[in-house]
Image: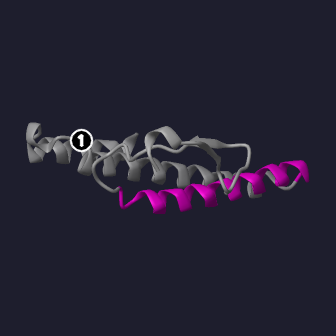
Amino acid sequence: MNKKSQKVKTHKHSPSLKKAVHPAQHPHVHQTHDGVKKRLQRASGHLNKVIRMIECEEKCIDISMQLHAVVKALIEAKKTIIHDHLENCLNEENLSSSDLKEFKDITKYL
């Protein structure tokens, strides 16, 4: 597909979400993105379950447990994306290996 024939297409999981079709933004493939996408889709399912639980006035402890699962999934997805970025997108020539390790270590707390 050339640049002139690019179109907006509907996202298969949510017809209301649209994304522009565009050439790759990076000269490399992110191996973690498929896994992160799956994790976020599971988190979305958990979040929908929490909403149904609230609507059905289920026990607060059960709702809290499901919310915990959603939050944990989001945090793990964020950490994976950040680590992937550090390993694949930053110009490592400008960072020492100890600087990179320190930065990766601190992202655990984001």
- Where does the C terminus fall, quadrant-wise? top left
Crowd rating for badge 1 (residues with CA inside 10 Å; few <14, some 14–19, many 20+): few
Q: Is residue 15 left or right of residue 35?
A: right
Which residue is disc 1 drawn over? Answer: 103
Q: Nearer the viewer, residue 99 or 33?
A: 33
54 inside magenta stretch: yes
Q: Is residue 94 above or below residue 46?
A: above
Q: Position of residue 2 (x, y in %)?
A: 44, 45
What residue lies at 36% left-to-right and 47% top-to-bottom? 108
Q: Which residues are magenta?
A: 30-57
Q: Nearer the viewer, residue 78 or 89?
A: 89
Q: Nearer the viewer, residue 65 or 71?
A: 71
Q: Position of residue 21 (x, y in %)?
A: 52, 45
Q: Position of residue 96 (x, y in %)?
A: 8, 42
Identify the coloring.
Answer: one colour
What residue lies at 52% left-to-right and 42% top-to-bottom? 5
What residue lies at 11% left-to-right and 39% top-to-bottom? 95
Q: Is residue 30 left or right of residue 93?
A: right
Residue 25 can be seen in this image = yes
Residue 69 can be seen in this image = no
48 inside magenta stretch: yes
Q: Which type of secondary structure does the marked residue at label 1 adopt?
A: helix
- Dominant SS of magenta comes to helix
Identity, as a three-letter code, of the amino acid under mark 1:
Phe
Q: Is residue 51 left or right of residue 7?
A: right
Q: Is residue 56 left or right of residue 100?
A: right
